[in-house]
Image (tube, rainbow, N blue to C red):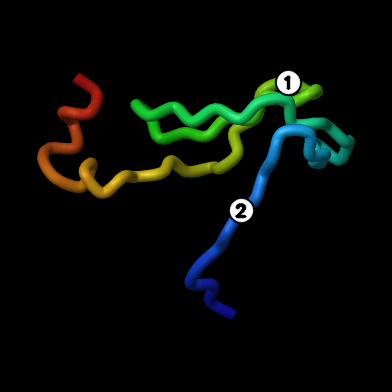
Amino acid sequence: MNVKNIDINLRVGQTILVKGKPATINKIEYHERTGEIELKTSAGPRKALTFQLLLQDQLEGDPAERYR
């Protein structure tokens, strides 16, 4: 089965599993420079995704310029 679209709904106060143990989401941060979404949980900080979000305006130009 090929998935074409996925929606992830996360909210502060939601309980998730971290390494098989329940943890509560305390804060959700989006880092605009890196495109990462980080969850601050009762079990410590966790990345929400194993990839980074790429915004439309980041598609233009030299990708190396993003890190200079």
Where is mark 1, residue-wise? 44
Asked whether 30 or 18 is in front, the reply is 30
Q: Residue at x 57, y 59 (%)?
A: 7
Q: Quadrant of residue 50?
A: top right
Sequence-wise, which precedes: disc 2 or disc 1? Answer: 2
- Count residues near mark 2 (Cα–Cα under 10 Å), then give few for <14, some for 14-19, many for 20+: few
Q: What is the three-letter code of the residue carrying label 2?
A: Ile
Residue 8's mark? 2
Q: Residue at x 49, y 31 (%)?
A: 30
Asked whether 27 or 4 is in front, the reply is 27
Q: Is residue 16 above or below residue 3?
A: above
Q: What is the three-letter code of the residue carrying label 1?
A: Gly
Cα separation, mark 2 vs mark 1, equals 20 Å
Please identify the residue farthest to the left as the structure is shown.
61
Q: Is residue 41 above or below residue 61?
A: above
In this rendering, would 12 be left or right of 64? Answer: right
Q: Residue at x 50, y 67 (%)?
A: 5
Q: Secondary structure at mark 2?
A: loop
